[in-house]
Image: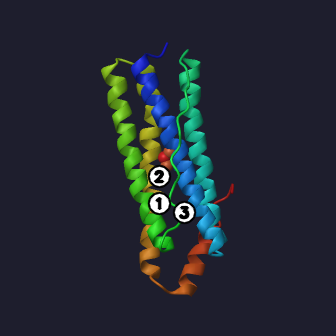
Amino acid sequence: MIGKKVQDAFNDQIQAELYSAYLYLAMAAQFEDMNLPGFAGWMRVQAKEEVAHAMKFYAHVTERGGRVTLQAIDAPPAEWASPLAAFQDAFKHEQKVTALIDGLVRTAAEAGDNAAGVFLHWFVTEQVEEEASVDEVVQRLKRVKDAPHALLMVDRELARRGGA
Ligand code: FEO
């Protein structure tokens, strides 16, 4: 059985993961508008992954006899000044999520909840990958600067991320 403290913290994280999905979907929408289908598809895949993250927390709470309660999700920004600005925001956001996961690890440890602790290992590793994959695009976009041709090349590369 999951304790109330860990349950509440996991419910907060469901909201944070769904907000992440919302944020990346907002970025995808702007990229569609900019005729950058590769960038848009990359963000749509990212949004799907965030929903999957939320569902992992949902399943864990439910399997352990807890109660999922959903919270309001804030509206994400609607626009970014450039693809680089969007990916820089995404990177900052992933750093925030990493801090949230670290906080959950502490909450689980303080509660003596080993099942939650083991469950969270996957997220600790996932966040390393999440930060790295977003930062890789940030670094590429920094090299592109304002060259439209180079931007289209990055768009074509990002289109290779399947599942959108
Ligand atoms: Fe669910 Fe992007 O971390």
- 3 vs 2, front mark: 3
Residue visible at 47% across and 36% down in the picture = 13
Earlier sequence position, callout 3 versus callout 2: 3
Dot 2 beta carbon under 8 Å from ligand 1: yes
Q: Position of residue 133 (x, y in %)?
A: 48, 58
Residue 39 in view (yes/no): no
Mark sitting on residue 55 = none
Q: Quadrant of residue 117?
A: top left
Residue visible at 67% across and 58% down in the picture = 162
Q: Are marks 2 and 1 in contact (CB under 8 Å)?
A: yes
**Along the line of sight, which residue is nearer the eye, 30 or 43?**
30
Dot 3 beta carbon under 8 Å from ligand 1: no
Residue visible at 62% across and 55% down in the picture = 45
Q: How many marks?
A: 3
Please name the residue that numbered disc 1 is placed on. 134
Earlier sequence position, callout 3 versus callout 1: 3
Please name the residue that numbered disc 2 is placed on. 130
Q: Position of residue 57 (x, y in %)?
A: 53, 31
Q: In this rendering, is residue 29 above or below 151?
A: above
Q: Residues within 10 Å of mark 3 (few under 14, many from 20)?
A: few
Q: Give the spatial CA distance, label 2 vs label 1.
A: 6 Å
Q: Quadrant of residue 108?
A: top left
Mark sitting on residue 78 = 3
Asked which secondary structure carries label 1, the reply is: helix
- Look at label 2 and name its amino acid: Glu
Dot 1 beta carbon under 8 Å from ligand 1: no
Residue visible at 55% across and 43% down in the picture = 18
Which residue is most to the top?
1
Q: Residues within 10 Å of mark 2 (few under 14, many from 20)?
A: some
Asked which secondary structure carries label 2, the reply is: helix
- Look at label 1 and name its amino acid: Val
Q: Position of residue 81 (x, y in %)?
A: 47, 73
